[in-house]
C-alpha cells in the first residue's frame, strides 16, 4: 500500500464501511456502497480498454456519480480530468483535445454540447451518460454499465504514489490549463490538513476509525479543484461529504438543517451572498454550522460581518493557495494577511526571500509537495516552476509583502494587476472597496486601454435591485477614505448580473470585454 488516493480510500472504506460517505439530492451512500459502486465502474472502464495513464473527462454536475467516477479512475490508475460544465462548444473542443481524452462521463443535460464536439476529437472513443435524457451517439448508460460488472476489487491493478491526477483551471485571463499532480504530492501539498500526522499509508483506516466523523458541505461544483480536495480531506477523516446539484441560499440552508452540516466550503463572496440573502429573507439559527471556509477567493469584511450578524458563533477562515501549490496558509480576518506554512514564502525578482517588514513586493512561492507542471505546456511550466538555490519552487502569480511578524499580506494576482501611469493597482482591493457600498452587491474591476496612462481602472457593477442608480460623485465620496485616488474607477458599467465561474471566481476576460464595449458604445 502506498500514498495513493485509491489505496487510502479503500483502506478507509474497509475500516468504516457503515459510516455515511456522501449525500446528495436525497441519496446517501455509505463508504462500503460508494467503494462497491466505484469498483463496478472501474471494471467497466477496464473492460472498455481504459487503463493506466489514460485520460477520462468528468463532464458532470455535483452528485455521487462524480465521486464514483473519480474513484473508479484512480482505482485503475487512469487520470480524471475535470470539465467546466459551463463551457460551450469551442471551449469544450479545446479542452477535450488539449487533455487527450479517450473517455468521457457526462450528464445528459449536456448531451447537445457533447454530441457537437465528439466528432472533432478523434481520440475520444468511450462515452458514458449519467441521467435519463437523450444521449450522444455511441454512448452507454451509466447505471447499465455498473449493473453489468462485479462490485469487488478483483483484478484491479497495484498502484503507486507516483500515479497522476490533473486539475484543469480556467485561470483569469487565458485558456484552460491542466495542472499535473502526483498522488503523494497532492495529498501532502493540496490536502495537508487532512493528512496531518499520517506517516504510513496503512494507518489511514485506523486513523479514520478513531476520528469523530464530521459532516462537511462542499458547496462549489466538484469540477472545481477546491471541492474535490475538500471531499478527499473529509474521506481521510472518515466523515460525510454533502453536495447540492444546484447551489442557492435556500438549498444550502435546507441541506445544512437536514444533514446537520458542521463545516461548509465556499469560494468567496459570490457563494456567501446567496446564503446571506436567504437568511435576510427568513432569519433562522443554524446551530450545527460551526465553520465556513473560503478557498479560491477572499471574503470581504462586509460579507463576513453580515454572516456573523446572522450566525454570531460562526468561525470564518480564508484558505490561501493555488491549483499549482495546494494549501499554503490561512487567515481569520479581513486584513488579507495570512499565516503561511513552512514551505511557503515570498520571493523577490531575484528569487530570494523577501525580508519581513521590508515592504518589498514579491511573488508568493511554495516548495516541497507541489505540482509537476502543466500538461502539454512546457513553456508555462518553465515560467511557473523554477529552481533557485537548489530548491524547486512553484510561483503562484500572487503578489504579496511580508509583515514584520512574518505574516504574508496578499495584494492580488499579478496577471490581472493594472498598470496605470506606472502605478500598480490590484483589482481585488478595489473590488472589496466597491462592494462595501450599500447599493453595490457585486463588482469586478479590470484595466482597459488608455492613450495617456496605458491602462485605466474600470469596474463592472451589479446593484441591489432596491437601490437607486449610484452617481459618480456618490461613488467617489464612498471610496475616498478607503483607497487612494489613483485607484478609483474612471469608468463604471452597470449590468443586471455579473458573470462568474460556477465556483464564484471573477471572470476578468468577460469584465474587460464588457467594459471595452461600454467605451465603444459610449
Image (cartoon, rainbow, N blue to C red):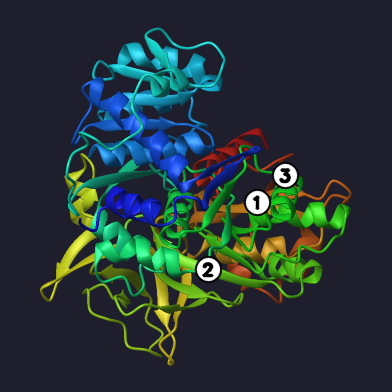
SS at mark 1 in the image? strand
SS at mark 3 in the image? helix
| Residue 511 visible in the snapshot | yes
Based on the displayed image, in which of its 4 quarters is residue 53 positioned?
top left
Sequence-wise, which precedes: disc 1 or disc 3? 3
Sequence-wise, which precedes: disc 2 or disc 3? 2
Is the residue marked by circle 3 packed among few (<14), some (14-19), or many (20+) residues within 10 Å? some
Is the residue marked by circle 2 packed among few (<14), some (14-19), or many (20+) residues within 10 Å? few
Based on the displayed image, in which of its 4 quarters is residue 169 positioned?
top left
Image quarter where the N terminus lies is: bottom left
Give the numbered dot on residue 502: none
Q: Which of label 1 and label 3 is nearer to you?
A: 3
User: Which residue is depicted at the point 87% across and 59% down?
Assistant: 283
Q: Is residue 286 left or right of residue 376?
A: right
Verify CB contact (< 8 Å) between mark 1 and mark 3.
no
Is the residue marked by circle 1 packed among few (<14), some (14-19), or many (20+) residues within 10 Å? some
Give the numbered dot on residue 212: 2
Image height check: is 302 above or below 156?
A: below
Q: Which of label 2 and label 3 is nearer to you?
A: 2
Q: Percent x, y for residue 382?
A: 18, 54
Image height check: is 421 above or below 345?
A: above
Q: Percent x, y for residue 11?
A: 32, 54
Q: Look at mark 1 in the image and give the residue it sits on.
A: 491
How far is the residue under mark 1 from the one under mark 2?
53 Å
How far is the residue under mark 2 from the one under mark 3?
26 Å
How far is the residue under mark 1 from the one under mark 3?
36 Å
Give the numbered dot on residue 251: 3
Image mark count = 3
Q: Percent x, y for residue 170?
A: 42, 43
Sequence-wise, which precedes: disc 1 or disc 2? 2
Judge by depth and name the residue closer to the eye, 304 or 48: 48
Amino acid at each position: 500500500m502506498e500514498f495513493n488516493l485509491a489505496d487510502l480510500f479503500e483502506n478507509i472504506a474497509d475500516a468504516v464501511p457503515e459510516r455515511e460517505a456522501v449525500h446528495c439530492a436525497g441519496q446517501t451512500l455509505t463508504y462500503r456502497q460508494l467503494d462497491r459502486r466505484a469498483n463496478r465502474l472501474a471494471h467497466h472502464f477496464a473492460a472498455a480498454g481504459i487503463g493506466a495513464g489514460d485520460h477520462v473527462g468528468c463532464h458532470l454536475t455535483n452528485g455521487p456519480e462524480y465521486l464514483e467516477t473519480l474513484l473508479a479512475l484512480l482505482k485503475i490508475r487512469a487520470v480524471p480530468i475535470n470539465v467546466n460544465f459551463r463551457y460551450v462548444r469551442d471551449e469544450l473542443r479545446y479542452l477535450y483535445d488539449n487533455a487527450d481524452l479517450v473517455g468521457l462521463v457526462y450528464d445528459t443535460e449536456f448531451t447537445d454540447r457533447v454530441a457537437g464536439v465528439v466528432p472533432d476529437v478523434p481520440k475520444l472513443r468511450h462515452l458514458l451518460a449519467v441521467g435519463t435524457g437523450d444521449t450522444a451517439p455511441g454512448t452507454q448508460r451509466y447505471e447499465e454499465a455498473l449493473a453489468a460488472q462485479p462490485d469487488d476489487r478483483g483484478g484491479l491493478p497495484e498502484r503507486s504514489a507516483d500515479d497522476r491526477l490533473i486539475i484543469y483551471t480556467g485561470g483569469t485571463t487565458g485558456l484552460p490549463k491542466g495542472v499535473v499532480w502526483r498522488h503523494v504530492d497532492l495529498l501532502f501539498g493540496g490536502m495537508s490538513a487532512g493528512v496531518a500526522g499520517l506517516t504510513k499509508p496503512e494507518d489511514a483506516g485506523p486513523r479514520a476509525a478513531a476520528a469523530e466523523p464530521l459532516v462537511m458541505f462542499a458547496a462549489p461544483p466538484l469540477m472545481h479543484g477546491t471541492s474535490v480536495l475538500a471531499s478527499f480531506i473529509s474521506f481521510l477523516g472518515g466523515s460525510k461529504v454533502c453536495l447540492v446539484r444546484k447551489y442557492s441560499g435556500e438549498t444550502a440552508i435546507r441541506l445544512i438543517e437536514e444533514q446537520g452540516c458542521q463545516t461548509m466550503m465556499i469560494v468567496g463572496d459570490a457563494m456567501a451572498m446567496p446564503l446571506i440573502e436567504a437568511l435576510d429573507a427568513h432569519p433562522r439559527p443554524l446551530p450545527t454550522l460551526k465553520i465556513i471556509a473560503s478557498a479560491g477567493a477572499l471574503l470581504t469584511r462586509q460579507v463576513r460581518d453580515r454572516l456573523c450578524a446572522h450566525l454570531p458563533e460562526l468561525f470564518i477562515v480564508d484558505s490561501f493557495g493555488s491549483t499549482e501549490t495546494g494549501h499554503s496558509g490561512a487567515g481569520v480576518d479581513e486584513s488579507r494577511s495570512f499565516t503561511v506554512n513552512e514551505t511557503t514564502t515570498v520571493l523577490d525578482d531575484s528569487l530570494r526571500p523577501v525580508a519581513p517588514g521590508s515592504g518589498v513586493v514579491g511573488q508568493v512561492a511554495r516548495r516541497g509537495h507541489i505540482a509537476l507542471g502543466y500538461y502539454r505546456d512546457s513553456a508555462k511550466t518553465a515560467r511557473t516552476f523554477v529552481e533557485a538555490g537548489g530548491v524547486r519552487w512553484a510561483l503562484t502569480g500572487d503578489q504579496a509583502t511580508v509583515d514584520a511578524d512574518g505574516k504574508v499580506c496578499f495584494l492580488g494576482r499579478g496577471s490581472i494587476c493594472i498598470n496605470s501611469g506606472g502605478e500598480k493597482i490590484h483589482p481585488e482591493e478595489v473590488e472589496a472597496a466597491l462592494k462595501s457600498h450599500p447599493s453595490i452587491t457585486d463588482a469586478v474591476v479590470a484595466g482597459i486601454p488608455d492613450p495617456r496612462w496605458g491602462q485605466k481602472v474600470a469596474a463592472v457593477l451589479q446593484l441591489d435591485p432596491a437601490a437607486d442608480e449610484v452617481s459618480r460623485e456618490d461613488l467617489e465620496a464612498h471610496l475616498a477614505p478607503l483607497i487612494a485616488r489613483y485607484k478609483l474607477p474612471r469608468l463604471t458599467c452597470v449590468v443586471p448580473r455579473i458573470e462568474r465561474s460556477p465556483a464564484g471566481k471573477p471572470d476578468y476576460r468577460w469584465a474587460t470585454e464588457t467594459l471595452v464595449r461600454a467605451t465603444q458604445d459610449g
